[in-house]
């Protein structure tokens, strides 16, 4: 075959390959004519259209290495199609170099040659088997298992930073969501296999300029230079799409944290720690799996650590108390119910609102204990009203998504009703709209079958309200504070509120408006046919004793 059709560079490459070391397989692949010219090696015959495709379909790639080899081939093809500039791609992969011989770990590297128009004309593929010594050291090959890994990784980061003084450097950390669950469900071997797949994928995805390592079990780190934040998001999305969301039928999801190395004098470990904080800040977030580090994140997470340290003791020391927020009839001005809301009376920090601790408890699962405590307190309260001759009103309690998804809500509610011997209509349950409407619908149906009144909390605050309404048979709809205040501001918004109320009545739902703060709001709601309101205009959430005074001034033990 003639080499006259090629650029000078291709010609030089072609000639260089003749000086091979005998061990290395040199393949010259003519991308334009779609044929290979084998130079110093066996493995791939002359004239094959696409040498990578040939390897892919042969028995020459070790079976367990096939998924990552597939990824590598995809990446090579997409580079060719993008007509990118000079590129070198490489992978370490066990190959069978000669028939009948065992698989040998090889370094496959591809250097593309471009024509004058920047289009790829050729690829020079080198397949070099690693020596026994290199394999036993494994230092270059697998910095995941080597004891020297941290040192090599940190040297590579330093080199990257030195080389890119005028660009930004990002520390991108990621882990596999609920990896423990994958281990428990599919077995530890499968978990290990998934981690190996991720590691192999990284060798394909990351270039020589993007050092990466595995930090602990399922936590990985990549360091890369970049110019814009969008570039990082694009890189992360390309990691996700290259790896896919499934491995051997196991669905998995990755959560990313990004820290930008603004102060290059800091040890790379600090940037790594910041990336950890960023990753943890979005853990469990269904809508966003990329967290970016910023200073306030650190403060928030320190607060989170404080909360987590104190929470168990707080439960033992009875620091969680129940506040009750009255629900009023707008027309009569009388209290017709209450919502139980948790407060934390911290011995040093004073009263902590739920907005500080509920999100933390939702993440770490402690919310389940808090929920149960509040439900029990509500039942104790109802019992005490009955015992002291006060006409009781229903108390609604909040059910967290965690409880809903993993525990027996119906059983627990029944148990409480029986234990305190209270009429079932006096204990009501609030569930906020959620993404997994189907599971919620199931629990709501069972609760209703038992006789409990079910309230849909925060209607209009999220994106699935109408869907929940369609699929889930609630009794009462609670209009969210934000929805009310925001929509009240315009004529169009007021119409939407009015129609939401009439629609709800039409489908047999009662309505409570939450967060009523002004007399205008109360009057407007009443004019639309909504007679029940809960909000600061009437009362903030108050301690139990104060609620007793308002509910029944004569009977209250605190009345004068
Ligand atoms: P939520 O269940 O929607 O409770 C209503 C929240 O709105 C309460 O906040 C209440 O104080 C506030 N609110 C009511 N009316 C007004 C108003 O007119 N203006 C303003 N600005 N706010 C008003 P709170 O007590 O801070 O509770 C916040 C959230 O924390 C609750 O929202 C609920 O999702 C959660 N939470 C509280 N206690 C518990 C609990 O025991 N278990 C669970 N799972 N979540 C709880
Ligand atoms: Mg609520
Ligand atoms: Mg609410």
Image (cartoon, rainbow, N blue to C red):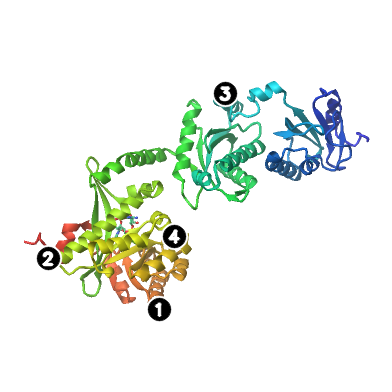
In this rendering, is residue 246 above or below 458? above
Please give the residue where the numbered disc 3 appears in the rendered image: 148
Q: Counting residues from the N terminus, which is met first, the one under dot 1 or under dot 4?
A: 4
Location of the N terminus by quadrant is top right
Q: Secondary structure at mark 4?
A: loop
Compute the Cα span from label 1 to label 2. 37 Å
> Who is closer to the viewer here, 62 or 370?
62
Location of the C terminus by quadrant is bottom left
Q: Secondary structure at mark 2?
A: loop
Q: Residue furthest bottom?
A: 506
* The CB of the residue at mark 2 lies under 8 Å from ligand 1: no
In this rendering, is residue 146 above or below 228? above
Q: Residues within 10 Å of mark 2 (few under 14, many from 20)?
A: some
Q: Counting residues from the N terminus, which is met first, the one under dot 2 or under dot 4?
A: 4
Compute the Cα span from label 1 to label 4. 23 Å
Tell me the residue at 19%/58% (across/down).
Answer: 544
Q: Residue furthest left?
A: 560
In this rendering, is residue 78 above or below 151? below
Seen in the image, is 178 located left or right of residue 518? right
Q: Is residue 181 visible?
A: yes
> Who is closer to the viewer here, 305 or 12?
305
Q: Which x, y percent locates residue 360? A: 37, 46
Please give the residue where the numbered disc 2 appears in the rendered image: 553
Please give the residue where the numbered disc 4 appears in the rendered image: 434
């Amino acid at each position: 075959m003639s080499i006259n059709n090629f650029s000078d560079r291709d010609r030089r490459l072609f000639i260089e390959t003749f000086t091979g070391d005998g061990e290395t397989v040199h393949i010259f692949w003519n991308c334009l004519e779609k044929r290979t010219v084998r130079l110093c090696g066996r493995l791939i015959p002359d004239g094959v259209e696409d040498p990578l495709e040939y390897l892919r379909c042969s028995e020459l790639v070790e079976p367990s290495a096939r998924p990552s080899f597939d990824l590598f081939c995809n990446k090579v093809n997409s580079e060719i199609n993008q007509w990118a500039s000079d590129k070198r791609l490489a992978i370490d992969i066990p190959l069978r170099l000669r028939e009948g011989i065992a698989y040998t770990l090889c370094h496959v590297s591809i250097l593309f040659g471009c024509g004058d128009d920047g289009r790829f004309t050729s690829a020079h593929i080198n397949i070099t088997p690693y020596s026994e010594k290199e394999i036993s050291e494994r230092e270059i090959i697998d910095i995941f298992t080597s004891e020297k890994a941290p040192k090599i990784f940190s040297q590579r980061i330093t080199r990257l930073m030195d080389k890119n003084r005028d660009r930004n450097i990002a520390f991108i950390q990621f882990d596999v969501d609920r990896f423990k669950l994958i281990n428990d469900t599919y077995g530890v071997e499968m978990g290990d296999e998934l981690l190996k797949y991720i590691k192999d994928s990284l060798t394909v995805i990351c270039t020589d300029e993007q050092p990466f390592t595995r930090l602990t079990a399922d936590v990985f780190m990549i360091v890369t230079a970049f110019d814009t934040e969008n570039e990082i998001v694009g890189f992360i999305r390309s990691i996700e799409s290259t790896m896919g969301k499934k491995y051997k039928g196991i669905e998995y999801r990755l959560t990313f944290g990004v820290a930008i190395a603004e102060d290059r004098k800091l040890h790379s470990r600090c940037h790594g720690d910041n990336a950890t904080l960023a990753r943890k800040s979005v853990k469990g977030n269904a809508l966003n799996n990329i967290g970016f580090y910023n200073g306030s994140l650190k403060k928030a997470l320190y607060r989170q650590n404080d909360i987590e340290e104190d929470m168990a003791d707080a439960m033992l020391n009875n620091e969680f108390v129940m506040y009750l927020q009255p629900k009023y009839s707008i027309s009569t001005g009388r209290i017709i119910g209450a919502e139980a809301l948790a407060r934390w009376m911290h011995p040093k920090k004073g009263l902590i609102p739920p907005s500080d601790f509920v999100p933390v408890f939702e993440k770490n699962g402690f919310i389940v204990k808090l929920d149960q405590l509040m439900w029990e307190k509500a039942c104790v309260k109802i019992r005490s009203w009955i015992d002291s001759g006060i006409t009781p009103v229903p108390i609604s309690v909040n059910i967290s998504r965690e409880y809903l998804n993993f525990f027996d809500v119906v059983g627990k509610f029944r148990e409480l009703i029986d234990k305190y011997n209270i009429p079932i209509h006096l204990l009501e349950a609030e569930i906020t709209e959620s993404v997994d409407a189907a599971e919620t619908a199931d629990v709501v149906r069972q609760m209703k079958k038992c006789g409990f009144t079910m309230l849909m909390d925060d209607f209009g605050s999220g994106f699935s309200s109408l869907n929940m309404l369609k699929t889930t048979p609630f009794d009462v709809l609670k209009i969210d504070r934000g929805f009310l205040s925001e929509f009240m501001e315009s004529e169009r918004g007021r119409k939407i509120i009015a129609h939401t109320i009439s629609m709800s009545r039409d489908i047999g739902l009662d309505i409570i408006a939450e967060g009523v703060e002004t007399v205008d709001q109360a009057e407007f709601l009443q004019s639309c046919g909504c007679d029940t309101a809960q909000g600061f205009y009437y009362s903030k959430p108050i301690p139990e004793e104060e609620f007793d005074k308002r509910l029944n001034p004569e009977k209250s033990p605190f009345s004068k």
